[in-house]
Amino acid sequence: MSVAGAAVSVDHYIGGRRVSSPETFEVRSPLDWSTKLADVSAGDGATAAAAVGAACEAAESWAALGPSGRGVHLRRLAGAIDETVGPLAEIECLDMAMLLESLQKRVISRGARNFRAYADLAEAHSERVWSSNGTDNRVERMPAGPAVVITPWNAPFMLATWKVAPALAAGNTVVLKPAEWSPLSASVLADLAHEAGLPPGVLNVVQGLGAEVGAALVADERVRRISFTGSPETARAIGAAAAANIVPFTAELGGKGPLIVFEDADIEAAARTAAEQYDDSGQVCLAGTRLLLAEGVLEEFLERFEAHTDAHVLGDSRDPATTISPLIHPDHLARVEGFVERARRAGDTVLRGGRRHRPDGLWYEPTLIRPASNDSEIVQREVFGPVLTLQTFADEAEAVRLANSTRYGLSGVVFTGSQERAERVGRSVRAGTVWVNCFLVRDLTAPFGGCGISGLGREGGDYALDFHSDLKTVQFRQETTA
Ligand code: NAD
């Protein structure tokens, strides 16, 4: 089938070949829900078994290539992505509604960077060696075996490449299952891997529903690693399957990040960054959705924040003037509406937004809520939409207490003009990533993950390579010279 003028396969990619399923699921565009994009093959247990089988067959020869041999393939795949930025951006935009311009300028090429970065990192790894107790010790990374990668519907291409690249670089073969609401760019990734000459079975892509093919993949005892991004609810199910087979798994889950603004901060920068939390309609796990403001800056902050938020343009993601895209799916829109309605009923105050943008689309207005209490559901649970909460604090201790008062711990944002405070608060906020006076800046070599129900384990840089490896210590008895 053709999407945005480019051919996209609706079938699985297993052992280097396209394979279809009799059952299909429908994919529609959030930009115009009346447009059906595709009927995609819905895999089942047999599909999962075939894909894991193909990954097992390819495992030994892929591992034997070593980091440099694999690096040649990964760099070729990165090049193929770079040459396909235009079509990939259009497909992803139609499928998930992320802003076209940001896909064209940044997001898709980040996918290529993921492959290059992990090819470099795997090659650069120097074995740790030391002497003790009359032996020389050496730590080696052994490829762990076939890995299953399961990704969510937001930022599908970027997240798939972020997770597939380290698995392949570490020497594991992969079965990727993208989310059923935005499955198309993963199918293009399979084609690019094919064209780039990745050996059959090294990367397999299966399509289908999480509870069916996804559950079958993670339960397969031949799988040796599971790398998951999605919701805590699904992580619990995957964790149970991983535990049954004693398989390590990483889980990158939801967030409810604080965005803390102290009285000594650059209020304009803080307000601008706060209004940016509505980008991608708030469907960003790392978003700082709880605005925590020093009492003294409330008025000035709100004035500036309102101006930046008023400047947002809700529209078609292909239009360069648009800054806020529609939500992914009518069910998700209903979920966001449900959160806001329950907040109203619970006595929270909706300061702006709180309704659909227009009756015929999937846009929801940028919404700001002053909760009646820190225990309000709207403060404590991830909405994953354009909904922020606003709370004030009297001093630094209260700011930190509020920041750490949810079960999540993925990210935090701190705005302050004081280096000492930045150090103190940066250390005290319980999160996998804390940004001080900036937001969403990422270094691929840094560890990435969450505390609490925001996740388990760390990926990124060497942390991801370690996760995808079995570490082995080899000890050699030292020659003694009498
Ligand atoms: P989800 O948990 O519903 O689905 C994620 C993936 O899991 C999908 O591919 C789905 O098909 C699959 N799945 C569902 N049930 C399964 C099962 N029983 N076994 C195996 N696979 C199964 O999440 P979602 O709604 O697609 O994504 C939104 C969530 O992802 C939000 O909570 C968001 O914060 C989180 N997220 C986290 C990060 C991060 O890096 N921490 C990044 C993006 C999104």
Image (cartoon, rainbow, N blue to C red):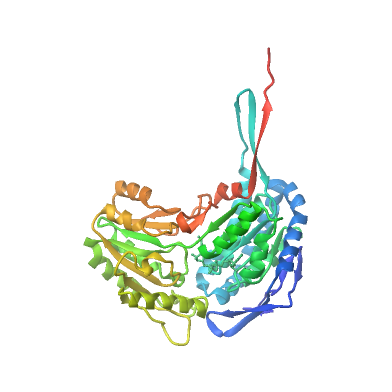
Task: Name the residue located 67 percent from the left edge and 51 percent from the top edge.
Answer: 71
Task: Name the residue located 68 percent from the left edge and 12 percent from the top edge.
Answer: 482
Seen as rendered, the residue at the extreme left is 296
Task: Name the residue located 30 percent from the left edge and 63 percent from the top edge.
Answer: 268
Image quarter where the N terminus lies is: bottom right
Residue 464 in the image: x percent, y percent? 58, 50
The one of 460 and 266 positioned closer to us in this rendering: 460
Whether residue 199 is situated above or below residue 420 in the rendered picture = below
Whether residue 133 is situated above or below residue 431 in the rendered picture = above
Quadrant holding ligand 1? Answer: bottom right
Whether residue 428 is situated above or below residue 385 in the rendered picture = above
Locate residue 341 relative to residue 196 in the image: left or right. left
The one of 346 and 462 positioned closer to us in this rendering: 346
Locate residue 464 relative to residue 314 in the image: left or right. right
Locate residue 76 relative to residue 460 in the image: left or right. right
Is residue 448 among what the camera can see? yes
Whether residue 130 is situated above or below residue 221 in the rendered picture = above
Q: Quadrant of residue 108?
A: bottom right
Total marks drawn?
A: 0
Residue 416 in the image: x percent, y percent? 30, 54
Residue 277 in the image: x percent, y percent? 40, 67
Task: Name the residue located 74 percent from the left edge and 51 percent from the top edge.
Answer: 62
